[in-house]
Amino acid sequence: MLTQFSHGRLEEEPERDIAWADRFEDLPLYFTTLHGQQNIKTVIDTMLYAVYTYDICHVVIDGTREMVMGQGQRSTDRLTAQDAIIWAFRRFATDSGCHVTVVIPPDDEDDDRELQTASIFGAAQVADNVLILQDRKLVTGPSKRFLQVAKNRFDGDVGTFPLEFSKTTLTFSPSTQNEALA
């Protein structure tokens, strides 16, 4: 994250390392120590604590599949458990006024097909917005990456934004090429 924040490889300029670390430390970011399998009640309680103690207004959740396993569900109940978790986040967002972003890896898809809202099961139905990071693998030439706004409940505008990945800064940024996506 420090590489992304500084837009450069700090190991190449160690004298800048401390200054960037100090700036990063000043950001209003909070991290939990919750990792792997967690009970949804524990996660929601932690989020509520953060909202009321630190005035958090945006929570990012990554790892819903691990959470599903933490609910004691058999693999056949996985979809039901995942939907229940998404609904719990939806209730939390509505009740607390805190925005929730959930990172959901897609189910196994063919590499030659674009992801759809159906690629994340029922979760897309309750989401206000669905953003999909697409990676179109091309037979010749580099792959094309783009951010797709697949659902926008607020004004309905959807579309795509071409992206380029920088290995130096480990970030995605708008494509500098003016080519249309087919």
Image: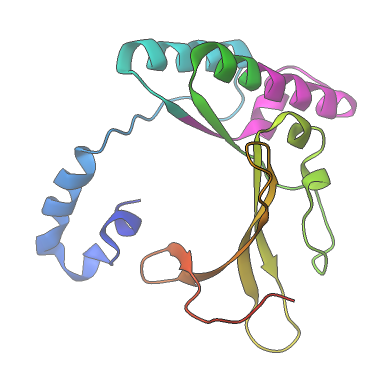
User: Residue 173 at what x, y percent from top left?
Assistant: 45, 65
Question: Please, is residue 182 above or below residue 6 in the view?
Answer: below
Give the side of residue 68 with respect to residue 172, left or right. Answer: right
The image quarter in which residue 126 lies:
top right
Q: Quadrant of the C terminus?
A: bottom right
Residue 8 picture location, percent across and down: 28, 66
Main SS, magenta region, reads helix
Q: Is residue 59 left or right of residue 136?
A: left
Query: Does residue 154 appear to the left or right of 122 in the view shown?
Result: left
- Residue 99 horizontal side relative to residue 1, left or right: right
Q: Position of residue 70 (x, y in %)?
A: 67, 21
Q: Which region of the structure is painted magenta? A: 59-88
Q: On the image, which quarter does residue 39 sit in?
A: top right
Residue drawn at point x = 9 percent, y = 62 percent: 15
x, y percent for residue 117: 78, 46
Q: Is residue 71 magenta?
A: yes
Snapshot quadrant of residue 56: top left
Residue located at (26% from left, 59% from top): 6
